[in-house]
Image (cartoon, helix red, strand yellow):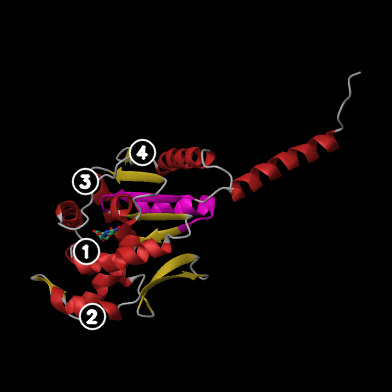
Amino acid sequence: MFFQIPSFHLLKAKRIAVYSQQTETALKKKINVAIDGHSSCGKSTLAKALAKEFNYIYIDTGAMYRAMTLYALQNKLVDSEGAKEEKLVELLDKVYIAFKYNPKTLKVETYLNGANVEKEIRSMQVSKYVSPISTLKAVRQKLVRLQQRMAESNGVVMDGRDIGTVVLPGAELKFFMTAEAHIRAERRFKELKDRGIDIAFQEVLENVNSRDKIDSTREHDPLKQAEGAIVIDNSNLTLDEQFQFMLGHVKRVLENIPVV
Ligand code: DC
């Protein structure tokens, strides 16, 4: 005899199915996602969105190099002649960089020796000197160690230049993002204008080009595509297209991770 299940029971069965799917996901090991790529290609926007989607922690390693650069500028340890490496290395133990959530801005903000420097580290002055500071071996060693500790418990989306190659070579998923330099400079120019910063487009383009060059050719941990990284050239992609593409990859990797 045909037995019809009342809709209430169907609903309940559906709820149980969704619940067990969620429990299964929760029981799965969290993964680490590494996102590397050129300056100003939108890595942080996508990394933040992915982290939010999976309730993971987002770590902006560029902000850490920027905070270190601000420290060097504050202490007159870098100028157009270059960095005073020996002195900066001597002072490295006195540099504390941390991230804290600000419930007012709903954002995670960067702290340097206890002071909120989120705004200052995004200035053109810091952008100008951050690449030379990032070339210093001792600076990299200190920040890489800190980043590795932050990712120890997994569930992290980290963006930078050497994440898939040096910081988290064992990350379950790696992306390498790029876009044409001119397009990246246009995006950055618009962002700076929107923040009320008066700057010539040519200066932004030069900064993008010079950072690309220093980041990719430096001796220690240069920017390069990690083995197995998925390349995204977003010159002609919308944010949503990029997000959906990355989301698909995270889901694919999570589906193949065994339940613990
Ligand atoms: O992501 P960003 O543009 O805020 O990074 C600023 C600079 O920091 C970038 O030009 C190079 C450096 N950097 C690095 O050397 N290694 C990282 N993992 C992240 C950033």
Residue 123 vs residue 6, the one in the foreground: 6
Instruction: Give the SS element for disc 1.
Output: helix
Q: How crowded is mark 3: few (under 14 residues within 10 Å), some or many (20 or more)?
A: some
Q: Which residue lies furthest to the right in this view?
A: 1
Residue hosting label 2: 91
Residue hosting label 1: 134
In this rendering, the label closer to the viewer, 4 or 2: 2
User: At which x and y percent is residue 166?
Assistant: 29, 54
* N-term mark: 1 or 4: 1
- Is residue 213 placed above or below 180 in the rendered structure? below
Q: What residue is drawn where x is 49% and y is 70%?
A: 102
> Which three-letter amino acid code belongs to the residue tagged 4?
Leu
Q: Residues within 10 Å of mark 2 (few under 14, many from 20)?
A: few
Residue hosting label 3: 182
Does the numbered disc 3 mark a residue whose Cβ is under 8 Å from ligand 1? no
Instruction: Give the SS element for disc 4.
Output: loop
Label 3, label 1: how far apart the Cα atoms are:
23 Å
Instruction: Give the SS element for disc 3.
Output: helix
Q: In which quarter of the image is residue 130?
A: bottom left
